[in-house]
Image (cartoon, helix red, strand yellow):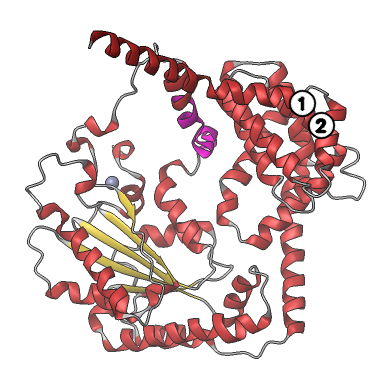
Amino acid sequence: MTDSLCSCCQLFGKPRARVNFIILAGAPDSVVYQRIKYLLQNYQNTNLSTQDTSLTNYDTLMTISSHSFDLQNQTSPIDSSTMSSTDKCCHGYFRLPFCIDDASNPTEWETFQKSILDLLNAKMDENVEERSTNVEPASWVLLHGSICLEPELLNVFIKLKDQILTMVTYTFTVLGLLVSEQQLFENWLCRNLAIENYQNTTYPEYEKRNHAFFSLLNSSKYLQENTLLVEENKDLTDNKLEALLKNVFQHDMSNYRAVNHQLRSDMERLLRPRHRTARDIRSVRGNLQASYQKNGKNQLESLLNCLKRPETAANAARQVVHLLLDEFSRLNKEQRRAYKRQLLCGFEPSDPENSNTITAQLVHYALRLLQNYEETTIPFLYSIIMVICETANHFFFRHELFNHTPEIYTLSMLLVSQRHYALTLGGLHLCSKILNADQNEHKYASAYLTHDPLTARKILDAIKWLLSPYLELGKLWNEEDEKKASSE
Ligand SMILES: [Zn+2]
């Protein structure tokens, strides 16, 4: 019956209490939180590669489309909230949004504590007549960030046991994902700031938090029992992370339990200070970039070759879609930069001119899909358009694509001329990416006009069509108004 379990229950097992807090306390600027959030939500789907519609909100767009353009055809989709609650394994997953601007301000922590108590007491409010699903707290509640190392935050959970919570049982688990100084520095590097920022802000702030965290941890047996300590570094691969999370709520985690004195002192010593100079930045950044370029190249070169062959193009395009729209959120900025450079510029200086790049090949492939228009491939086509738009965010390298691949003008014009909600919107999105890429000389506005003198007309027509339901509504409103006026 694993099918009926949600992603979290498949990963963690059945919830031990009614509400289970997962507190990810770690370094600032780390992508590990994104990786964990992804696992929590997609554990059951991690091996599925056919979810491009869910990556782009294509379904939502088409629902809007059918509501706006197709008023007669109102077949409402099955409402998931009417599903009986006995079918559910738990009360779901929730990422608790909270914002502490100033960790030294007690008022902010009082508000935070109140929000946790409200969450646990939500179910007690029996007077609420129409109990919508969000009145009941979720079974799995996630909090994350470097702020979670703060004793004020952890104390809220430690003190919970003294509160009177009549209805709701809870557990909390702190997963301390601690980094060494080197790792902290590498995380920080992506932010493109002066070294003074690291020396005066990032390191001292994390060091202070880390120190405060360990003094609280060393003094509270209760916190130790609920805390796991893990070093976050390059060895913490997706597989290891998954294995770790699978065991978070199991008992055989003695290697990571904070009750172990030796482990605590080893983990505390991870962050030994190190003097860093501007030269260190250059060399560390250089090494990191080289390794990112190399990893990217290995993957992208074979994808490019597959994209060029008709029989393998679809599969390769799908892999690029997943890389850009799914995996990108779990890569750091430097890694994304390395990918974007190769996606837009290829591997040799002459590649862009010869359309020997992944984005140029994606444009060609999208044109082929559009020319062999088939209803079933439209969501896939739309996700490819979103990928082209996403890569075209790169401030410099996008010009390589716009200057050397005139087919992108054909593609965007064909898209805006479709009377298909998602494709028209995708086309307009692409047009605006191209037109806004050069706002000083409006180079691409001239490029468009040379390519197709009717460009402006086509764009205006598309916008008029998108607004047509609104005009229709206006007409209906006026008719109703007149009817009312004549009956009075
Ligand atoms: Zn569940």
**Is disc 2 surrounded by few (<14), some (14 to 19) or many (20+) residues within 10 Å?**
many
Q: As drawn, is 68 to the left or to the right of 448?
A: left
Up the image or down, 466 lies above or below 125; here it is above
- Which is nearer the eye, 479 or 288? 479
Q: What SS does tag 1 mark?
A: helix
- Type of amino acid under label 1: Thr
Give coordinates of residue 366: x percent, y percent. 71, 28
The residue located at (50%, 57%) in the rendering is 35
Residue 244 numbered mark, or none: none
Range of residues picked out in magenta: 48-63
**Residue picked out by circle 2:** 448
Asked if the beta carbon under badge 2 is closer than 8 A to the nearest atom of ligand 1, the reply is no
- Type of amino acid under label 2: Tyr
- Which is nearer the eye, 320 or 392? 392
The residue located at (32%, 67%) in the rendering is 252
Residue 57 on the magenta span: yes
Contact between labelled residues 1 and 2, with CB atoms less than 8 Å apart: yes
- Which is nearer the eye, 473 or 180? 473
**Residue picked out by circle 1:** 455
Q: Give the distance between the C-alpha atoms of the residues marked 2 and 1, in whole angstroms.
A: 7 Å
Up the image or down, 185 lies above or below 354; here it is below
- Which is nearer the eye, 354 or 248? 354
Q: What SS does tag 2 mark?
A: helix
The residue located at (78%, 50%) in the rendering is 342
Q: Check the picture and name the quadrant holding the N terminus.
A: top left
Image quarter for residue 169?
bottom left
Q: Check the picture and name the quadrant holding the C terminus.
A: top left
The disc, 2 or 1, on the residue closer to the chain's N-terminal end is: 2
Up the image or down, 1 lies above or below 265; here it is above
Give coordinates of residue 313: x percent, y percent. 72, 30
Give coordinates of residue 396: x percent, y percent. 79, 53
